[in-house]
Image: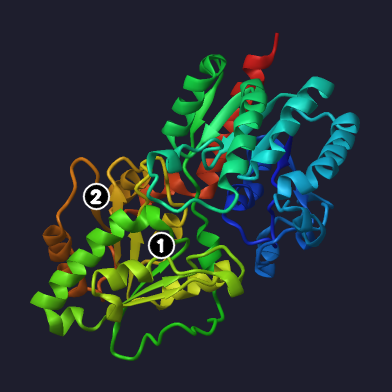
Amino acid sequence: MRNLLIVSPHFPPVDLPDMHRVRVSLPYFREFGWQATVLSVAPNFVEAPHEPQFLDRLPADSTIVRTAALPARWTRKAGLGNLGLRAFPFLYSAGSRFLMHHPFDLVYFSTTVFTAVPLGRMWKRRFGVPFVVDMQDPWVNDYYHRHPEVRKPPKYGLSSRMHRMLEPWSVPSAAGLIAVSAAYIDSLAERYPALQRKPAMVLPFAAAPQDFEGLTQPRPNRFFDPADGKIHAVYTGRGGQDLWTALRLLFSALQIGLRESPELFGRLRLHFIGTDYAPANTARKSIQPLAEQMGVASSVREHPQRVPYFGALQFLRDAHMLLLPGSDDPQYTPSKLYPYILARKPLLAVLHESSGACQVVRSTNAGRLVTFGREASSAAELYAAWREMLGHLSVPPPTDWQAFEKFTARHMTRRQCEFFDRVIALGKP
């Protein structure tokens, strides 16, 4: 049995997307020859919603070490909120104690808290333990340079300069790379040619069927009434202007529907739930403004406040159909696709033709796929597909569950462990 130290600053009960890879893999690491220890930050130091139900789904024998961090209520007075920086000395100290006293074979960074990744190079230099980085998002991101019309996040300039210093200091020392998109690996290998000689693997996010199995007691739905005679189409997840290309196509098709089939499309209500990660009192709408511009605001409802993960699953269950507008960034792969499929509801996906999610939808036959990009579908084509779906909402999707099996957590964990074995084998003299 080999020993794996996983660095995941966000971890249950913290409810943030980048912890799901580790969360759903934990039950299976031992089966494939690896004993995992998770190094995380104590939830009271993390500025994010908490979902206690996550804790019920962790293996009883999990080893999870939680460190402190500088309290954000102090550091934000100096303009510092980044969790990786606030927790860095605590993570370093705790990880060093483990590596000093236990025979770990590999360190695995699975997080979008990129400011924690430099620990890999520091520990490698001190203890000789190799590390692997899981790129769930790009660390250095040129999206806003390619799309100057999109509003940049606060402090984007400062954080971008910091990442452009830390990435070249850290990533070339990695023994291997995992990424949800081949484009992430290609761009890193182009910037750092030394990575071309190291193992790399594209690994999509994993599906966790057991999450739906736990929805035994329905949660209250404050956003819509499934029995009010309307047709409720639901999207849960972040918003942003990078979704506007897909949404323009979707809203254009809605315009046609309201004009050509008002008796059907007039019953449609499109709900976009949990679209802003900001605290509830500062959450801003990023989808409703586009709906107003395009004259379909009466059919669109945006609720920007974050909702708990299992609450979001309940909304998917309550919906009559699900919507998945994708980013105009072709590298982006929406992790929410798997819960959408597992909800077993009619699914309409509007995705960039180069998105990895297209292959998932096609191979599993889990929904209707409309693409944009070089070979963009027209609003009329989307309207025709949508109208047909609305006529068969009571029919379950013809999902190929055998094909879906390769996207489940157990299968994905096996692939992770095989990759770890390969990294260790290549690193031996």
Please give the residue where the numbered disc 2 appears in the rendered image: 371
Among numbered discs 2 and 1, the one appearing first in the sequence: 1
Residue type at mark 2? Thr
Residue 2 visible in rendering: no
Q: Going by the image, does 289 lie left or right of 194? A: left
Q: Residues within 10 Å of mark 1 (few under 14, many from 20)?
A: many
- Under circle 1, the secondary element is helix
Nearer to us in this view, 381 or 85: 85
Residue type at mark 1? Tyr
Q: Going by the image, does 381 lie left or right of 179? A: left
Seen at 15% across and 65% down, the residue is 383
The quadrant of the picture occupied by the C terminus is top right
Q: Going by the image, does 59 lie left or right of 335? A: right
Question: Which mark lies nearer to you, 2 or 1?
Answer: 2
Q: Which residue lies furthest to the bottom in this view?
A: 228
Tell me if residue 73 comes above or below residue 119 in the rendering.
Answer: below
Residue 14 visible in rendering: yes
Tell me if residue 236 comes above or below residue 423 in the rendering.
Answer: below
Seen at 48% across and 39% down, the residue is 180
The quadrant of the picture occupied by the N terminus is top right
Query: Quarter of the image holding residue 289?
Result: bottom left
Percent from the top left, x then y, of residue 149? 37, 49
Nearer to us in this view, 337 or 196: 196
- Under circle 2, the secondary element is strand
Percent from the top left, x then y, of residue 332? 42, 45
Tell me if residue 44 comes above or below residue 271 in the rendering.
Answer: above
Percent from the top left, x then y, of residue 266? 20, 82
Please give the residue where the numbered disc 1 appears in the rendered image: 340
Q: Residues within 10 Å of mark 2 (few under 14, many from 20)?
A: many
